[in-house]
Structures are given as structure tokens and as C-alpha cells.
Amino acid sequence: MSGNVPLLADFAVGALQTIPLQSDEALLPEGLDISFKLVPSIIVIGMMLLFIVAGFMFKAANTDDMWVAGRSIGNIENGMAIGANWMSAATYLGVAATVAVSGVYGLAFVVGWTTGYFVLLIFMAAQMRRFGKYTAPDFVGDRFNSDTARALAAITTFLIGFVYALGQARGMGLVGMYILGDWSAITGGVLTGYQTMMVIFMVITVAYLSLSGMLGATKNMVLQYVILISAFLLGLLVTGWTAGFSTLLPQLEYGMMIDSLASEFSEPFSEGSYYLWVATCFSLVFGTCGLPHVLVRFYTVENERVARWSCTWGLFFIALLYLSAPAFAAFGTALYGDQIGAVYGDPGMTGAAGDVLVVLATQLAGLPEWFVGFVAAGGIAAAVATTAGLFIAASSAISHDIYANIINEDATQRQQVLVGRLSIILIGALTIIFALDPSAAIAALVSFAFSLAAIVLFPMFFLGLWWENTNRPGALAGMISGLIIWLIPMFNEGHFGPGWGIDVLTTWMPAIGSALIGTPIVFAITIVVSLVTTEPPLETKQMVRQCHSPDPMPSDKTAADIVAEKNGNANAPADD
């Protein structure tokens, strides 16, 4: 591969760069009106106040409320929370942007992320609920009888949550500037307009999360889903109608205008190979099944039946947006080309403009300022909802999995809740600091988080639930090798240093699609090591069988509790 030809991985990073890296005001999206807008400001301020009030009304009183919402969430309510938790600013704004800029390659995200929930529904939702722990690392630690495995899962959970949150912070700052304008003056010019807005929204988010925990966050996610899906669908319908692209079904009618768009939009694999598409899609499918803030939603319901139905409802609520995003991409591409300039080529649409294409399209369609502000508010709601899920998952990894299970096993509920709240504040502060001016490597990790989850965590969850002979040595070997495998393309492509520049590795194992090779390898290592080492204890096997038992389980019992009662003892799984 010639040095003058862009590498496939470079394209993948560019296509996935839904979060602009720069904080320089001169590089803001072209064509976007950055100014204070009264009615949209009232909408957004009222929305954020509503989130704080809801967080206060449903604030956490104990560890059950803090981490699993008291296991009291119903199926439709949890389905909405799954939808809000999943559809981040990168989804709300970024899917349309990726389809617009990358054409058919962008559909890998629609297909991959949606398909992942089918796998969750069939193979994991009910079984994870029956296992009955607080967090994803909690499952790994107890299933494999290992504090080392728990710590590895907790570190991976924190890494995924932290880098994912950087993208949400950037989305809040960028969309917030459209609504509230440039407030850099209040910092005396120390911070730019984007930085000021990002800090404001992040502080509000951290404030209500540190108070509310999972219970308040879940109630807020329901509100946030209603706001974001209403804003997105109404924005799409009105934009298509006003611009003359569609009438009542833009999700179907946008196909009639594809021939009028550039070939880069519709020509299959013109912007990337078929292999890259498959590899990306694979990573997104199984990365979805390994994301801790997604899996924890199944611990917040009463039983496995509600877990299955909440996953079904969640898939429906998510599909409403994903099936609509390509239409928004087509409308935004056409409006941009007519009013601003060429979408493709040099210079073409910038990444920053693509990031806010949903908002920009409604503005270019000539819609009222208050309506465009409402659509933008949906983007902020999406960012806040996902940040809530990420921070709860990451803080639980610190408070519950590391502090309460490893450092201080005698920690009281009050101590755990306090450490959890302090952890949320700490993660929020770190996110704000790094999101002020994120480096390329850190911002790119938002995209690579799915590969990390697919390679390191998904095999542990799947084998842990479906093969009772998966043991501690196998899990440790799989997780450690998975981390190494994930790091290889990251180093090769220069995300953690100058880069190795091995073209063959870049072509066949791009960082964004590394799970296509990495996940099967981790499965194989885990299985082989488990076969050649001692089988797990009988109690562990019984826990796995309990996850598949047709007998109903009380909402306050875990698989370990049921096994202990049947065996007439209360022995906990052995530690390392």
C-alpha cells in the first residue's frame, strides 16, 4: 500500500470522528448560527432543571438505589431508559453525519448497533438478570471466582466509560453554543466559548448524578428519551416536508432523492472496502453486547421476564431513530450542497459540520428558530442520558467492584454510596479536563471502545453464561490476551505513539474492526485454557445452570443465593 494512499484505518477514524477534536472557535461548523436564542435557551434551561428536580425526587437512599434502581423498573420504562442510555450525542448527531460523509460505510453503524440488541435479547438479557449482581465486573468476579478478573473488568469498564464520556461532553459544548451562544466572556477569556458551554453542562450533569444514582438517572432517562426521540422524528418530518423531500414517511420517501445526490453517498464501498465494512459491523454488534452501561440495565428490573421485554422495547425505541437517521443524512446532504457548498471533495463538508448535520439541516430548511432549538435540545438530552449511564457504570466499578469487594470488604452501604458519589465527581472532573482540548488519540478511543468491549468483555459474558466449564484461568488468559490484542492495532496506527505502520496489519486488523479477529481468538484461548486446567467448583456450575432454569426467582435473590439455599450453606465463591 503506497504511502500516498490513505490507509483504511485512517478512513475509519475519519468516518467515525463524530466528535470534532478542535476547540478553536474558528473551526466551528460552517453555516451554523452561533448566537443566544431566547426560546431555545428557555427550553434547554428548563430541561436541565427538570433533570435536577427528578434526580432529587428519586435520589439514592442505599446501594440498591444507587446501582440497580432498587430493581423496580418496569419493562416499557426500562426500554425507554435503554434507548436513552444508548442513543448518545454521537448517535443522535453522529449516525446521520457518518452516513452523509461516508455513504454506505455509515450503514455499518445502523446495522451493527441494532443487531447487537438481538444478540442481547436472545442470549444475555434474561440470563444476566437471573445471575443477579450489581455490575458487569461483579458478574465477572463472582462467575470466575476471581478478584483479579473483577479488577480487570472494572478497569476496562472505567476506560470505556471515560473515553465514551469525552464525546458526550464535546457534543454538549458544541450544540450548547448553537442555543446559548458564546459565553467565554464570563471566564474572562480563559476558556473558549465551546469550553465554557461544555463545562456548564457537564457540571449540571455531574451534580444531579452524584445525588440521584441509578434510580434518579433511570427516571431521568425516560424523560430524556421522550425529548430526544420527539425532537429527532419531528425534526425529520418537518425538515423533509418544508424542503419538499418527503411527506409523511421520510424514512421511505428519501430513497427517491438518492439519484440526485453525489455517488459518494450511495455507491457501495466507494469510501472503504467490503472487509472494513464487515469488520466494523462485527465490532459494533458484539461491542454492544459487552458495554457495561448497557448490561447494567438488565439488573434494574424485577425478574428475567421483564429483562427480556425491556430489551425488546429498547430495541423498538432505538430502531425508531436508527431507521430515520439515513433520511436525515440525505436531507442534510442535499440542503448543504444547495446552500453552503460541495459536500464531497476538497474542501467539502468538514467533520464539524457533519457532527451537527441534524441541527444544521433544520436550520437550512428555514424552520423557526425555536423549532431548531428544540431539535438541538434533543442532542443535549441524548448526551446527558448517555453520560449518566456511563458515569454510573464507571463509578460502580470504583465503589462497588474495587472499593467494597477488594479494598474494604466490610464497607457499609453508606460508605459505598459516598464513594460512589465521590467517584462520579472525580470521573466528571477528569472528563471535563480532557474534553477541554481532547487529543486525537483520546477522541478516537470513543470509536474504539466497541472493539475493546467486544474483545475483552463480551467473551467473558457469553462463555460465563453459556458454558459452565469456563474457569478462572481461562477467563484471566482470555481477558489479558484480549487487552493485548486490542492494543496491537492501536499502537500500529499511532494512537498510543508514533505508530508502527505495518500495512498488512492495518488492512486486515484495523483498530475499529479489530474484534473480527480478536474476539474469536479470545474465545479460543479461554476455551482451550479452561479445557486443560481444573474445572470450576460445583457451586459455580450450579450458578450457571440457575441462570437457565425455568423456575422463577425472587427479585431480591441472586443465582448464588439460590444455589446456597439448595446446598444448605451460604458459602461465597472462592477468591484468588
Image: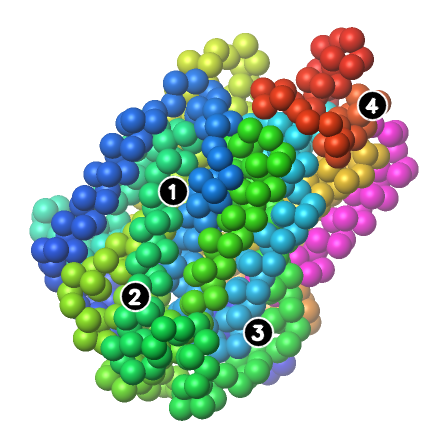
C-alpha distance separating marks 3 and 4:
46 Å
Q: Nearer the N terminus, badge 1 or badge 2?
A: 1
Q: Give the alpha-carbon distance from disc 1 to disc 2, as whole Å.
A: 20 Å
Q: Earlier in the sequence, mark 3 or mark 4?
A: 3
Q: Secondary structure at mark 4?
A: loop
Q: Is residue 373 shown left or right of residue 1?
A: left
Q: Is residue 502 visible?
A: no
* Residue shown at 53% from the left, 70% from the top: 107
423 is higher (above) or lower (below) than 494: above
Percent coordinates x, y for residue 491 in the rendering: 58, 58
Mark on residue 88? none
Query: What residue is shown with label 1?
Result: 222
Give amino acid for label 4. Pro
Which of the marked residues, 3 or 1, is nearer the chain's N terminus?
3
**Of labels 2 and 4, the one closer to you:** 2
Q: CA distance from mark 1 to mark 4?
A: 41 Å
Q: Mark 2 is on which residue type? A: Gly
Residue occupying the point 36% across, 73% down: 248
Looking at the image, residue 54 lies above or below residue 59:
below
Q: Which residue is mark 4?
A: 537
The local secondary structure at tag 3 comes to helix
Mark 3 vs mark 4: give the one in front: 4
Q: Which residue is mark 2?
A: 235
Could one spot residue 227 in this view of the protein?
Answer: yes
Instruction: Write the residue at 60% across / 58% down.
Output: 115
Q: Tag 1: residue type?
A: Val
